[in-house]
Image (cartoon, coloured by chain):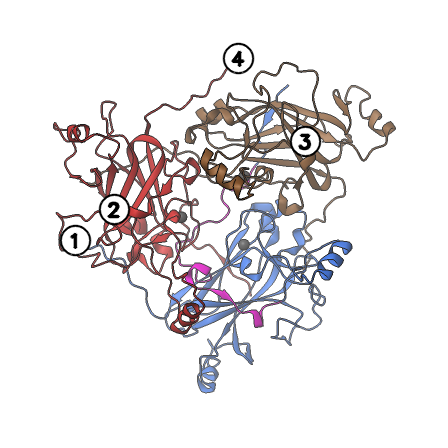
Chain colours: A brown, B red, C blue
Amino acid sequence: SSRSSKSPWQSPYLAPIFKRINYASPGLGAVIDPYLTSPTKAKHFPFYQRLLLDSAGIKKYQSRPPIQALTPWTEIGDCWCAALTESPNHPTSKSKIQMDGRNGRYVQLAIMLGYDIFPDEIVIEHLPIKTTPFPGIAPKDIEIWADFGHLSHKEFASLTAGPRGLKEVELYPPMGLLGTFQYDAVANEKEGRYVQVFRLEYNQNQHDEFWTKKLVVRVKRNWGGENTCLYRVRVHGVPVHPHPELVAEDD
Amino acid sequence: SSRSSKSPWQSPYLAPIFKRINYASPGLGAVIDPYLTSPTKAKHFPFYQRLLLDSAGIKKYQSRPPIQALTPWTEIGDCWCAALTESPNHPTSKSKIQMDGRNGRYVQLAIMLGYDIFPDEIVIEHLPIKTTPFPGIAPKDIEIWADFGHLSHKEFASLTAGPRGLKEVELYPPMGLLGTFQYDAVANEKEGRYVQVFRLEYNQNQHDEFWTKKLVVRVKRNWGGENTCLYRVRVHGVPVHPHPELVAEDD
Amino acid sequence: SSRSSKSPWQSPYLAPIFKRINYASPGLGAVIDPYLTSPTKAKHFPFYQRLLLDSAGIKKYQSRPPIQALTPWTEIGDCWCAALTESPNHPTSKSKIQMDGRNGRYVQLAIMLGYDIFPDEIVIEHLPIKTTPFPGIAPKDIEIWADFGHLSHKEFASLTAGPRGLKEVELYPPMGLLGTFQYDAVANEKEGRYVQVFRLEYNQNQHDEFWTKKLVVRVKRNWGGENTCLYRVRVHGVPVHPHPELVAEDD
Ligand SMILES: [K+]
Ligand SMILES: [K+]
Ligand SMILES: [K+]
């Protein structure tokens, strides 16, 4: 007997192409800043296997590196998973943010861009929730911080002035909070919206001056999983130095 | 002169995303069981090159390994091709199935899953027939067997009882036939249906108890080619131990 | 605060599947002919790093190799970029074409096919212009040459006869111009047509006899960039020796 049926399928594409430059693309020179990025989750090797690796002097216990959070994905596992940190789901303190990703309680991903830009939009991609046994590892509460280390103390201070000034800053390294949002895993599960676009609070008009070359994605809470994983982060913005335009010259 | 035209193109996606977990994904721990999997087709090296490789002690004559049948594909060749076996297109016997894939006349792919599941659906993907010079290597008659080695003799025997019991079994290793179907290469060619979904005979309702951790895909016949190749097999089912659900907790 | 918006996105696919065989696919045996292919662009290493590499005897200054022009792409940078050649945008001479890609002023990519075919259509793919800071590196004026080295002098001469004969030829190696067209980067930018299909001047009817096993893609001008990059070239045609057809035999 031969029965063929059609299982319902999600939107047929994994990685829509935006009509904008993704400045977080490694192909445009974006790299990970390891000093401000959380450690990577260890691989789960069985005990005896770890023993064997240890005795052989091999220390490759890590799963995929943070650069995975900048590259495209097609399958479950094509992501970066941060190591388990202290109570990620129930932060005891919201006011004090520890910038050192290596010891902090939040998951951080720091991206050094290849270009100076006014970032205005962040795209967060996660696997369709219906296709994974671990729905809880999706990011939930996300903050986007920008590094302003290229500014003088005075210039940095000026960014906080006025009604449009930065509301939250950190002094070392000098950073400002450009936006706070939530990745909606329920919309992912129910409506198939696994690619979610978020406008930042700043740089939405031409007078804003919050340009940077380094962005920090801070996941303050996930959807209940033990670890937090990022499938892809994209960064949109306006370049400080305009790119050449396409010239349709006459032949 | 400059003429631009639009060649007709197929549906624009290669690998639709189903709204279900693919338990045959390597990212979920699925691996190939080499003992029950057919040998891989040898690469066609010219004679003198083989001589050279031989003299250098290199034995890498194989084409892509069986894990290719579990991973995504985009191009011709992103598949696993089994070695030529005895008269694959004209099996002399239909009643006797030789389980040892290394000597048998059928192509077998054995998948050890990362989870215990009640498998209920299999997806077979093959390259669009119109894009390949070898249409005959597509699989045709397919059987899905499940390993029940985790059961006692008595438990296994009980699976065959009643009108909904297993109709065909093999005793070593203890396996049962969960479904028989045909991959339709003509529908692939004429209608562009190169991703085909097949419901199994079992586990379609909650009372079925045919759970397993190892599935065998047995291709009994292809579409006339000398070899048989698999681009991707996906496995859908219900997990024995439920996965955590997404909790949309209040903030 | 949490604001989510929808950035407009391009057509959701990167690499449409044509209902034809792509004879330029490496999976079908296509390879690059290095003797007729332009040198590859050097990587931009900082001076001190180059010094270090030099002192270590490492000469890997090249970016991605020409085979990248035959493989699929998803991200910026998944392409082959030719080295800077003499005034690529303002060729001083149009009549004299230097066939040696290593010294010529044009960018050339020579593809040895795995099959003898009557080529009738070329597909040129480039990154969506809106997603790149370097719009000018897209190819513009393109010529397609076919190698007829398998013919005798007399046979080659006969290809030029009559109103449908080759209009432009080169004698060493013996090649003929099968088509001239323009990749439209403006249509790419404005309409999202980044996959463009071009019919060749020849082999559009069954009586044409311009079969070949080697094609040369010659980019005579780009859209104003310093270098020229190719994301993917596909080749459609009719095989000289027909492929087996799919046989839907009765069961
Ligand atoms: K990724
Ligand atoms: K595959
Ligand atoms: K490519």
Name the chain letter of the residue that bears numbered label 3: A
Q: Position of residue A183 (x, y in %)?
A: 56, 25
Q: Secondary structure at mark 1?
A: loop
Name the chain letter of the residue that bears numbered label 1: C
Q: Same chain, marks 2 and 3?
A: no
Q: Nearer the viewer, mark 3 or mark 1?
A: 3
Quarter of the N terminus of chain B within the rendering: bottom right
- Give the side of residue A83 with respect to residue B132, left or right: right
Q: From mark 1 to mark 4, how far is it between C-alphas?
A: 60 Å
- Give the side of residue A155 with respect to residue A42, left or right: right
Does A248 appear above or below C166? above
Q: Give the magenta-colored segment's residue range.
A: C9-38
Q: Is mark 2 within 8 Å of ligand 2?
A: no
Q: Nearer the viewer, mark 2 or mark 4?
A: 2
| Few, some or many residues within 10 Å of mark 2 (<14, 14–19, 20+) | many
Does A207 appear above or below B244? below
Q: Residue furthest bottom?
A: C154
Q: From mark 3 to mark 4, how far is it between C-alphas?
A: 26 Å
Q: Where is mark 2, residue-wise?
A: B218
Residue type of the residue flagged with mark 2: Arg
